Image (tube, rainbow, N blue to C red):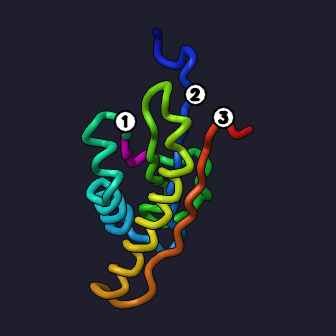
Amino acid sequence: MAEGDGVANREIRVRLDRTASEGDVGALREWLAREQPLYVWASRGELAIEKRERSEVEPGSPMGFGDEIVVALIGAGASALFKELLQAVRYAVEAWRDNRRDVEDGEPPGVDVDGVDPDAR
């Protein structure tokens, strides 16, 4: 089967707000890669966690604001896991924000977690 034939992309986009630094983007991506069950799914080849450049960035945005983290399910059976994955990503993001409060000064950046599942449309 060619890429894209019969397999819809199920992605979760994690976007930090304008207060985020480049370090915040990288730290959150690494946190997600180590978080259970995301780590397990990725190690089985069912999940990819990538940092991508956003397409709709406002002029004058701070460094790091133009990036987003994309958590993508891989494979035709991915639809059954999507809601579970979305919940796991939201939980992991909140855990990262709590941890950042403990290890750095100031409030952590706001984070938007948005799921894109073509089967849900």
> Most extreme residue toward the right, as rendered?
121
Q: Is residue 97 above or below residue 13?
A: below
For the point 45% across and 27% down, the residue is 75
Q: Are marks 3 and 2 in contact (CB under 8 Å)?
A: yes
Label 3 to label 2, Cα distance in Å?
A: 6 Å
In the image, what residue type sits under mark 3?
Answer: Pro
Instruction: Write down the quadrant of residue 30 in the picture.
Output: bottom left
Image quarter of the C terminus: top right
Label 2 to label 1, Cα distance in Å?
A: 14 Å
Q: Is residue 7 above or below residue 55?
A: above
Q: Main secondary structure of the magenta part?
A: strand
* Magenta range: 48-52
In the image, what residue type sits under mark 1?
Answer: Glu
Q: Give the mark nearest the N terminus, 3 or 2.
A: 2
Label 1 to label 3, Cα distance in Å?
A: 18 Å
Taking depth in this image into account, of 42 and 68 the one nearest to the observer is 42
Write down the residue under mark 3.
118
For the point 34% across and 80% down, the residue is 100
State the mark number for residue 69: none
Give the side of residue 86 with respect to residue 38, left or right. right
For residue 24: magenta?
A: no
State the mark number for residue 8: 2
